[in-house]
Image: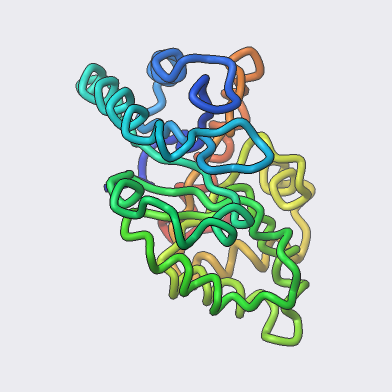
Amino acid sequence: MLDFNCFMDLHNHTKWSDGADKAEDIIINAIAHQVEAVGITDHFCNDYKYSIGTNMLEIYFNEIDRLKLKYINLIKVFIGVEISYISLLKNCSILPYDLLNQLDFILIEDLDYIPATIRLEDIARLLNSFKCGKGLAHTDLAKLADKYEDMGGLDYVLDFLKQSDLFWEINTDSAQDIFLNILNSSKKDEKTEAVLQGIIKRKIPVSVGSDTHSLVQYNYGRLKIANELAKKLNFGENN
């Protein structure tokens, strides 16, 4: 089971998809920085990024499982994948749910780029097929809420997260305004504050992910700031 109350980095890419480093290198780096929980989340079934195919999924599981056991006394290692909502919608009828549900969690990306004609209730039904943990990767909830102003805006979006049992990720590599504002509290605006207060009110779990594609660009400072905020949000604080 995922642990959101520790120093975490639950979003990392490796040579299994479009990352530059081996999964073991990511884990060793996390240990060196005293990260308590690390997630390997390579792209899966993605039409526009190099990703793991269905035929490689079981081999991927076995490799990360081996590393999980190897470093069990030093760090919690979680196995995940990142799936684009677009790819999920396109391939939902042929996905290997029996294998995917053996994952610790799945990250859904690109949700904030969907057209407003797609209702969140339809997405919720699609996500019901996943019985493992699931969360939204680098999703600008304020931007998504603007699309559904006629449906209740931010309340509609946050209720969807709560009812779908989704966690929300603070992504330390994202250039989206909401994450730049979160990581620099002096820039926090009303929309960002409303998102954070809404998350606290509904007790939506918050994760942290570096979205690392290369350890050369690893930024521990941003990861530390994000974890400090996630801890406050997960304990119902924001000050």
Residue 81, position as x, y percentages in the image: 46, 41
Depth check: give the residue in front, 111 or 209: 111
Q: Tell me the residue at 63%/37% (across/down).
A: 172
- Picture colour scheme: rainbow
**For the image shown, how many numbered marks are present on the structure?**
0
Residue 56's place in the image compared with 170, above or below, is above
Residue 206, position as x, y percentages in the image: 48, 53
In the rendered image, which quarter is residue 143 located in?
Answer: bottom right
In the displayed structure, does residue 118 sit left or right of residue 122? right
Q: Tell me the residue at 53%/43% (across/down).
A: 45
Depth check: give the residue in front, 6 or 218: 218
Residue 155's place in the image compared with 137, above or below, is below
In the rendered image, which quarter is residue 127 located in?
Answer: bottom left
Q: Tell me the residue at 59%/75% (across/down).
A: 120
In the rendered image, which quarter is residue 17 located in?
Answer: top right
Depth check: give the residue in front, 45 or 212: 45
In the displayed structure, does residue 155 sit left or right of residue 142? left
Residue 54's place in the image compared with 181, above or below, is above
Residue 230, position as x, y percentages in the image: 50, 48
In the displayed structure, does residue 50 sit left or right of residue 129? right
Q: Tell me the residue at 40%/35% (across/down).
A: 55
In the displayed structure, does residue 85 sit left or right of residue 8? right
Residue 41's place in the image compared with 66, above or below, is below
Image quarter where the C terminus lies is: bottom right
Depth check: give the residue in front, 96 or 215: 96
